[in-house]
Amino acid sequence: MSRHPQPTSGESARPRYLDLIMGAFAVTLVVSNVASTKVATLDLGAWKPVFDGGTFLFPLTYIFGDILTEVYGYRRTRRVIWFGLAMTLLASVTLGLVALLPTGPDSPTAGAFERVAGFVPQIVLASLVAFFVGEFLNAYVLARLKVATQGRWLWVRTIGSTLVGQGADTLVFAFLAFGIGANALPSSVLWSLIAFNYVYKVALEVLLTPATYGAVRFLKRAEGVDAFDRDTDFNPFRVRS
């Protein structure tokens, strides 16, 4: 019997590791949204890049998305994306409700929590819209490229899909989170944030390509699946397989 996985539609027996990846994916997304409430600047001499705090962790969600689509296929990835969006919305609603509670007279976070939590809904709304557009574009491009390349050149699929998905995500998120409302940034700062975030996210994808290769290789052998989305319905709103 061959030790290598055979190409499938992605609907094999119950996967052993999918729930772990889904949990890590959702936690990474939620933490990134909370961290995005802080806008930071690095002083690198003549260059002072501006970025939001979620920039460090958020690119991992796209790497998870690449691995999920490559191994399990678009249909299962679609359900994981919706799960992550639902958990993000739950976190936002919870923080918003807590912010509305009366603050105790001896609270060490008086005023601070309300200020941060009050900004979270705008961040989450921006993230939900941006992530919906970007992550589904990322999964779609990777799935299509996999069929077109007949499963070869994984690096072309992961980097190519990231260029498209992260580009859309970065633009939508930045304009909705920091381009409108009371927390809007000056246009020069906004474009600096967009440029740094996009370059950083794509660069991290490139740097972590060997790790992506290792994870994909391990999961394909462990799960016995290598999904090819040849006849897949790519409608992002169709959650059921």
Image (spheres, helix red, strand yellow):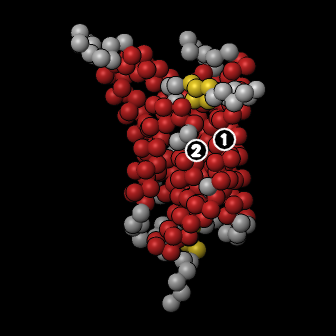
Asked which quadrant contains residue 89, the reply is: top left
Which secondary structure, mark 1? helix
Q: Where residue 182 sits: x, y (%)?
A: 55, 11
Along the viewing direction, whichever of 195 and 23 lies nearer the viewer: 195
Residue 200 image label = 1
Which secondary structure, mark 2? helix
Residue at 57% x, 36% y: name it: 55
Q: Are marks 1 and 2 in contact (CB under 8 Å)?
A: yes
Along the viewing direction, whichever of 51 and 181 lies nearer the viewer: 51
Tell me if residue 229 comes above or below residue 133 in the rendering: below
Asked which quadrant contains residue 126, the reply is: top right
Tell me if residue 204 comes above or below residue 52 in the rendering: below
In the picture as drawn, the residue positioned furthest to the front comes out as 45
Residue at 68% x, 47% y: name it: 203
Along the viewing direction, whichever of 163 and 103 lies nearer the viewer: 103
In the image, is 106 to the left or to the right of 202? left
Q: Where residue 197 sits: x, y (%)?
A: 65, 35
The local crowd at label 2, few if under 14, some if 14 to 19, many if 20 or more residues have their Cα within 10 Å, is many
Residue at 69% x, 26% y: name it: 48
Tell me if residue 159 comes above or below residue 15 in the rendering: above
Q: Earlier in the sequence, mark 1 or mark 2?
A: 2
Look at mark 2 in the image and give the residue it sits on. Answer: 59
